[in-house]
Image (cartoon, coloured by chain):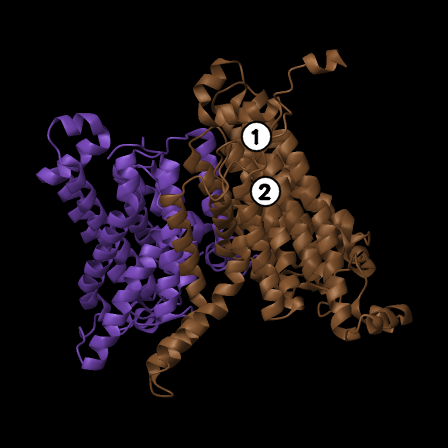
Amino acid sequence: MSADASIPANTTAPRPPDTRALLLFALVACLFIGTGFAQSWNTALTIFNMGLVSAIMALGVNMQWGYAGLFNVGVMGFVALGGLAAVLVSMPPVGGAWAAGGVRVLLGLVLGAATIVAAILAWSRLPPGRMRGIAMIVILVSGFFLYRAVFDAGVAAVEAVDPAATGYLGGLGLPVILAWPVGGLLAAGAAWIIGKTALGLRSDYLAIATLGIAEIIIAVLKNEDWLARGVKNVTGIPRPVPYEVDLQRSEGFVAFAERIGADPVTFSSIMVKLSYAGLFIIVLIGLIWLAEKALNSPWGRMMRAIRDNETAAEAMGKDVKARHLQVFILGSAVCGLAGAMMTTLDSQLVPGTYQPLRFTFLVWVMVIVGGSGNNWGAVLGGFLIWWLWIMVEPLGLGLMRGITAGMPEGSWLRDHLIDSAAYMRLFTMGLILLLVLRFSPRGLIPER
Amino acid sequence: MDVLNAFVALLNFVIIPATAYGAQLALGALGVTLIYGILRFSNFAHGDTMAFGAMVTILVTWGMQSAGITLGPLPTALLALPVGIAVTGLLVLATDRVVYRFYRTQKAKPIIFVIASIGVMFLLNGIVRFIIGVDDQRFADGERFIISARTFRELTGLDEGLAFRTTQGITIVVAVIAVALLFWFLNRTRTGKAMRAFSDNEDLALLSGINPERVVVITWLIVAALATTAGVLYGLDKSFKPFTYFQLLLPIFASAIVGGLGNPLGAILGGFLIAFSEVGVTYAFRKVVTYLAPGDWQPDGLLQLLSTDYKFAVSFGILLIVLLFRPTGIMKGKSI
């Protein structure tokens, strides 16, 4: 007993409860509950579910920016990779497409990858000199043509198989929950490639590199029909929770709904949303627990030390580049996980909806407003900013209606103002970001 | 073998469009590089500054058109451009006064400026969409072609036509004038020299009595002029759509970094390098090769290395190669 007491417990000492944080979380809870009363519980739950996903994205970005000071503006790309994972894991395989050219497509991809590996090997193994450059270029050029020759025919064959309904290879037909970690893995892989090249250079370069990879990932999703049907979208991704119709058909459910005096149709939709919320909350709590453990461990202290003074940390023998790569991959994986969850929630992958303002920069607003370096802050920012993002639109419309009330019906200015109210949200987000950055730069719940 | 027709096809589909696009990218990249050299941060709001300037110019153009003022064969937008530059200049000065100056006096880290510029980007995005909407706007008027494909065919008797659009010609001419003015300013005037000194070594410049706030104001004004010009030229040449301007951020940054951030000559070089690779890699060379091939032989495929949807991948690829092998850019960056 006395031996236990003598161990210094400063690393795990319980902190005094942070009243400010509690109050802020209570306020955000009130916003959601208020939406439930003022509009409908269905709406409130829809916003809440996306709020949960946003909070996880914000956690991922917070790992990179808050712990390590890495500036990743390619969140959208990692989120989209997660969405792709949901399709690749859960959709049933398209047998016809596999028979027509599936193997050929895979072979093409392997050839492409092999070309790049061979080029890298040539560069690192051959002695420096002119021969090395020529060898690498020869490998790349001949590999590219070989890859295109094999790959293009396969793609054409796959995309010709019933293009209106499928026209892609389909997925593995596994439960969609499995797609969540797979989404994280896909995003981690992309992050590894980016991190290997752009980390260790100026922070601005990482920003541009991530911006670029995100655009390219979206371009791939939009144009590679064999992969996930491109702009034709994949719909009807299997759910991890029951369908509303099935609930409404089940006698037990209808009896239960009547017993609590609810309309079975509305209640079934609320139940489905609640089940999603339950799954997401489990993931979010697990991540927060892990993130808090990590942040308060020696690893977390090392990360913050590197962030605050790279030179000093390097002098202490810390491998700054390797640690940066590690945390960059981790954060991106969390974003990928959130992306897979979001696509599961939507039951569809629509590449056209991935907009950098919505999926990259809005997440940044969440982290900065919530409090960079603080996991709870990022989560709070995720919920609060997502709620605002949804609510500013009707509020802006109401405001515009108020402003234009005195104008004559059908006037050009009136119509224009009311039509443009939707863009108020971009302006509001910019304003919030600038105000917080200026007057409360450490965010609503600052790092301790 | 028909070298002449092959060359005309290449000129028509690759060289002329890429030169015009390269000029637009170079003007954009010059703005980014100047901000980087003087204020020392990557301005993410640059694409939206371009969109804002173009929007103001479009509105003024429409006003002029409805008032019956035109430039004859040239697009009216050229007449409206100075107004666009002036309004954009006021806007960037206002953002500097309200947003960036605070962080400058605080000597905040560059990354804080970048985040602030993201906030400004959101604001401008909202303003532009609020005023002009998200749709495509066309505002080019006047003569459409300097040489149309038909006239060229009749003139030369070649099978292949060459269309040289007025907007492409104007882009190139205006870009050359703008760049010449900029370099004259940076190299010959006292203020320009002060800017270069400030970019080279801030402390030394301060010691020699250069007023930093004045340098900053002039930089912003030049950047507003460059951004508006680039935005209007791009809009004339293609069409004006706010989202495309946001997407231009990637090739513009790629141009500036490839050329060497902070180096104006590098920005121009980078702009043309990116433009030529983008157009060259995404152009289907089937026609050119058919002309060059002996006899009636025709290639089976389109001979297109990448589909046009992947044009971002080209700027990105070049960026990665430069970052891997020469991180400071082709021309040494970080000073004007």
Query: Which is nearer the eye, A35 or B21?
Result: A35
10 Å neighbourhood of mark 1: few (<14), some, or many (≥20)?
many
Using the image, name the chain to which the residue with label 1 belongs.
A
Q: How many marks?
A: 2
Q: Chain of mark 2?
A: A
In the image, farthest residue toward the right: A251
Q: Which residue is mark 2?
A: A59
- The residue type indicated by label 2 comes to Leu
Query: Mark 2 or 1, which is nearer the eye?
Result: 2
x, y (%) of residue A291? Answer: 63, 35
Is residue B61 left or right of A304 when viewed as pictured? left
Q: Which chain is brown?
A: A
Amino acid beneath label 1: Leu
Query: Which chain: purple?
Result: B
User: Where, by quadrant of the figure, is residue A414 drawn?
Assistant: bottom left
User: Whole-percent x and y of residue B185?
Assistant: 14, 43
Q: Are marks 2 and 1 on the same chain?
A: yes
Query: Looking at the rendered structure, which numbered label has been put on residue A325?
Result: 1
Mark 1 lies on a secondary structure that is helix
